[in-house]
Image (cartoon, grey):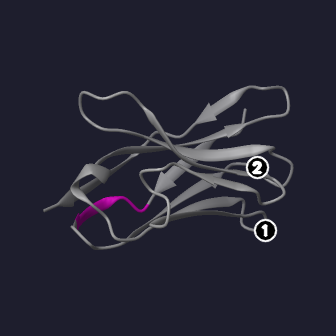
Amino acid sequence: QVQLVESGGGLVQSGGSLGLSCAASESIFSIPVMGWFRQAPGKQRELVAAITSDGRSYHGDSVQGRFSISRDSAKNTMYLQMNSLKPEDTGVYYCYADSRSGARSWGQGTQVSVSS
């Protein structure tokens, strides 16, 4: 399975921006779907955004218009640009990759904290 490493989390004030990266251990060119989940304390893991190998993307209702997912096959990296952050965006953000066989790989997670 592909190994994934997230980076870019941190603490930001409400209204600020952060960019997350998810670096893969191998080529992501043919990985059908990659995306981001997040988990806030005491809540279930929530799908934030996903992107296919041909660039089609999905963004959850709570982040639509504020977050943007992208992937760069040349760098084997997926990104999540987060703008207009709100305290409710606080949580651990995990990237994932679904292989053609259906196996899912996860990153270790990166903390995003938004202060009011």
Between 97 and 66, the one nearer to me in the picture: 66
Left or right position of 108 against 104:
left
Q: Amino acid at mark 1?
A: Ala
Residue plotted at (43% across, 42% down):
109
Q: Position of residue 72 (x, y in %)?
A: 72, 66
**The furthest residue to the front:** 61
Locate the N terminus and report the quarter of the image it occupies. Answer: top right
Vertically, is 81 above or below 42?
below
Tell me, yes or no, whether the highlighted magenta stretch contains residue 114.
no
Q: Position of residue 92 (x, y in %)?
A: 35, 43
* Magenta stretch, residue numbers: 8-12
Residue pointed to by mark 1: 74
The local secondary structure at tag 1 comes to loop
What label sits on residue 26 in the rendered view? 2
Left or right position of 5 against 99:
left
Residue plotted at (67% across, 29% down):
104
Which image quarter: residue 11? bottom left
Residue plotted at (74% across, 44% down):
33
Locate the C terminus and report the quarter of the image it occupies. Answer: bottom left
Residue 7 makes an appearance in the image: yes
Q: Amino acid at mark 2?
A: Glu
Q: Main secondary structure of the magenta part?
A: strand
Q: Position of residue 30 (x, y in %)?
A: 86, 49
Residue plotted at (51% across, 48% down):
60
Tell me, yes or no, whether the highlighted magenta stretch contains residue 9.
yes
Residue 81 makes an appearance in the image: no
The local secondary structure at tag 2 comes to loop
Q: CA distance from mark 2 to mark 1?
A: 11 Å
